Image (cartoon, rainbow, N blue to C red):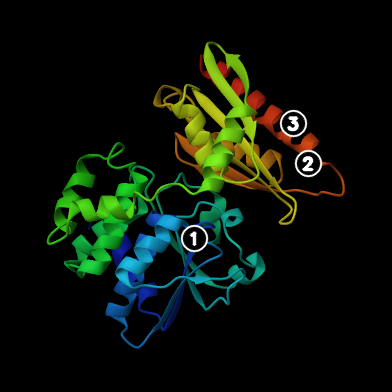
Amino acid sequence: MEPLQENIENLLKFLKNDEILFLCHHNADPDAVGASIALKYLAKTLNPSGNFRISANSISKLSRNILEEVDEEVEIVEYPKLPKTVVLVDTSSTNQLSVDEDKLKECDVVLIDHHKKTNLVNLCKFYIVDEKSPSTCEIVSEIFRKLGIYPPKNIRIALLCGILYDTKHLKLANEMTFSILAWLIKGISFQKILYLLSQESDKSKRVAHLKACSRMEIREVDGITVALSHVSSHEASSAKTIVSIGADIAFVVAVRKREEEIRVSARCRKSVSKKVHLGSLMEKIGKELGGEGGGHAEAAGLNAPYDKKKKNKDDVIKEVLNLCFEMFKKEWENIQ
């Protein structure tokens, strides 16, 4: 029996339970939402009388478009009520969730993800983590294919949106991606999927990008251009923008006083990720800061606690950016 088939059979045992919460990371993107919608449908197929919910503490604007299109709902709540079975979707650390960790440890936790495996798997009764998959929606689509279940149109739209989003409109696609797309696309306009994912950035995001660029500090490591910056929000897209305009790698910090949290997003070019895996690097930096990190080779992040009584915001930003630079420098020089 091939490993995926065996994994699917184990997954089905949990999806047949009477009550399941599908839990997404904060600001849940189309990949997290699309995969959750499809998994919820699969659970409903297996147990029509079951009670199934999708939850996140926030979702992106693009995800809202998709939910409206496919007539689905995600409950927006911090610290949701946890049933016995909780399925974490497209999530690589508990710091990406608003959840009571002590209560989560009492649940049967299942993880479906495509990021680099972290110690989150130690909380899980069962997990399917495939770092080689460009999106979680592809993993879920392949589960449907292996089961011989062809999902209805609205579920396939959700999956297609997740795949297109996380592959950056197919720039990161592989051979399996196109095989899955061909299977899902029947009766669906590809242009419609692109339209659902093409909403213009809101003003706050555009302003954050401008501020991140204006605050940049440029350093070099063996000819590699390292950009360091900070914003109040939209740190992930700000890091992506900085790399798109010329940096080889970018670290962008956001310190949130009210949430007492430090967030760092990192992005880099493929030439850098071939030597330094950002997911591994951010996991190490996260531990140094007393938090958790992880992600992909070219896109990763971390969350860590911030005690505003001990240090002011500006000092924390400076210390965190220096730590990111020094740890990247050390990793880079070690592999030369």
* Amino acid tagged 1: Ile
In the figure, residue 53 lies in which quadrant? bottom left
Asked which secondary structure carries label 2, the reply is: helix
User: Residue 122 appears at what percent x and percent y?
Assistant: 54, 57
Numbered mark located on residue 59 in the image: 1
Question: Extreme bottom residue here?
Answer: 49
Report if the CB atoms under discs 1 and 2 are less than 8 Å apart.
no
Residue 3 can be seen, yes or no: no
Quote the CA–CA distance across marks 3 and 2: 9 Å
Neighbour class for label 1 at 10 Å: few (<14), some, many (≥20)?
A: many
Residue 52 can be seen, yes or no: yes
Question: Extreme front residue here?
Answer: 203
Comes first in the chain, label 1 or label 3: 1
Residue on which the image places disc 3: 318
Quote the CA–CA distance across marks 1 and 3: 29 Å
Asked if 186 appears above or below 50 in the picture, the reply is above
Asked if 22 appears above or below 114 in the picture, the reply is below
Asked which secondary structure carries label 1, the reply is: loop
Comes first in the chain, label 1 or label 2: 1
Residue at the spot 14% in from the left edge and 52% down from the top edge: 182
Query: Considering depth in this image, is 18 or 167 the residue closer to the camera?
Result: 167
Asked which secondary structure carries label 3, the reply is: helix
Asked if 288 appears above or below 52 in the picture, the reply is above
Numbered mark located on residue 313 in the image: 2
Numbered mark located on residue 326 in the image: none
User: Residue 292 appears at what percent x and percent y?
Assistant: 62, 47
105 vs 195, left or right, is right
Residue at the spot 51% in from the left edge and 58% down from the top edge: 25
* Amino acid tagged 3: Lys
Query: Considering depth in this image, is 201 or 24 the residue closer to the camera?
Result: 201
The quadrant of the rendering that contains the N terminus is: bottom left
Residue at the spot 35% in from the left edge and 61% down from the top edge: 34
